[in-house]
Image: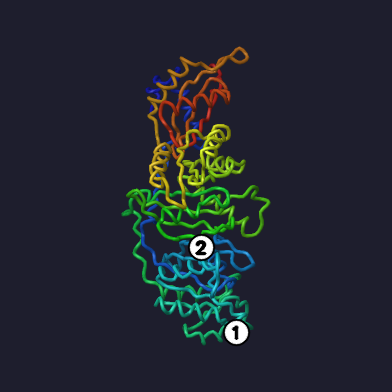
Amino acid sequence: MTAEHSATGPGELDAADYAEFMALAAEEGFDLDGFDGADGAEHVRLPVLAVVGRPNVGKSTLVNRIIGRREAVVEDKPGVTRDRVTYEASWNGRRFKVVDTGGWEIDVLGIDAMVAAQAELGIEQADAVLFVVDATVGATDTDEALIKIIRRAGKPTVLCANKVDGPSTEAEAAYLWSLGLGEPYPVSALHGRGSGDLLDAVMDALPEAPPQTFGDAAPGGPRRIALIGRPNVGKSSLLNKVAGEERVVVNELAGTTRDPVDEMIELGGKTWKFVDTAGIRRRVHLTAGADFYASLRTSAALEKAEVAVVLIDASETLAEQDTRIISMAVEAGRAVVVAYNKWDQLDEERRYYLEREIERDLVQVQWAPRVNVSAKTGRHMEKLVPAIETALEGWETRIPTARLNAFLGELVAAHPHPIRGGKQPRILFGTQAGIRPPRFVLFASGFLEAGYRRFIERRLREEFGFVGTPISISVRVREKRKKK
């Protein structure tokens, strides 16, 4: 865009104005070239290491040590991790995936049995197993039973003797030779002691990863979908339904999920990366321990996603928490789909009142696609992908500058800004400064009131769609230049 083209704008904009406008847009931090979002790493098949053991032996602490950051939720009590959670790691130039699993126990019922089943699936799907034992306790009957499962799977296994914090406890680690898994590697996951030797052994057990070829990957990789909502609205049930398997633990206990769980899912002829997240509680700063860190990781998962599917329990009255979670997705700049779950539980009276609640409480996201689903029965699941695709299309819509300014010219002519203090600000020029989400910069002769900006946003949606995406409008006021 050059200054010669500026006459297409709703007002006169000379070369100096245009240069000033572009400088201000750059100062604002707008990306005028858009966002490429390429992520070639998604398409490389990396070897998988499953970290298993009984509860509270330090698996998640060890996983954090291996990946080099505090990612897995850790708390000093058993049973914090419940699902299979995958992270990417590297050692000595080799990349691999680490699967953190929940604690495995014998003859357990309820949610503990589901956690154990997820750990066994992790073993089956891995290329190698890292078996973690608490060296300060020694081998237990539970450890012996889990070893039988690992042997049946026939996977290469590395034995980690954890909680060896000094030379005095190395002797205790030596007793673990009796397990028949080979050399026990004494490690302190908390302090990092011995982790290098352990990772060298892991590299020997894992198959070689294919070479990293970012250039050959399909642009963008699978689209990333975050399932968010308050606790117990059915996020994990929805993920299991679209995955076609019991991928994550589902229980009536609110707050079952703690770590965001990634899953590649074939749906509607495409591969999607769905992320099940922990329920967002009423006040994050009032939560403690595992729930506090789970809430932080949900926020981080939302930042990495492209689309936020906000699940709302349609059988209950809309809560302030629901609107706050939607606002959180909008403020993060994600495309938004609102899914009303448990639709099969609604009678006609509840549906009537739900419509009234939506009109009253969700007016700020009328632009978001809405789907009425049942994660339990699978009702209307086929409508989820079209809604996500519609939201992504709106999220990535770009309007040519000439067309935008023609639209703004017609809009200003028909509905000029109200006169305030004897002055009437004019929109001189506008451009779309970026996508994902759409961001606009308007260059004006004076301040534009918030109500008039909302009016412009509403008319932009009417004219160009922008279904399923928030819109950002920034106004830069032209400063008066001194006459020479």
Nearest the camera: 252 or 123? Answer: 252
Amino acid type of the residue that numbered disc 1 sits on in the rendered structure: Glu
Task: Locate residue 303, reporting x and y percent.
Answer: 51, 48
The image's mark for residue 83 is 2
Nearest the camera: 384 or 170? Answer: 384
Nearer the viewer's eye, disc 2 or disc 1?
A: 2
Task: Locate residue 323, reporting x and y percent.
Answer: 58, 40
Secondary-structure class at tag 2: loop
Calculate the distance from the C-alpha at mark 2 to the C-alpha at mark 1. 30 Å
Name of the residue lying farthest toward the right = 286
Q: Name which of mark 2 and mark 1 comes first in the sequence.
A: 2
Apparent side of residue 38 relative to residue 336 in the rendered image (left or right): left
Q: Is residue 387 above or below residue 102?
A: above
Q: Is residue 362 above or below residue 226?
A: above
Nearest the camera: 249 or 315? Answer: 315
Residue 419 occupies quadrant: top right
Label 1 neighbour load within 10 Å: few <14, some 14-19, many 20+: some
Q: Which residue is mark 1?
A: 172
Task: Locate residue 371, reporting x and y percent.
Answer: 45, 41
Secondary-structure class at tag 1: helix
Apparent side of residue 353 relative to residue 151 in the rendered image (left or right): right
Nearest the camera: 223 or 479? Answer: 223
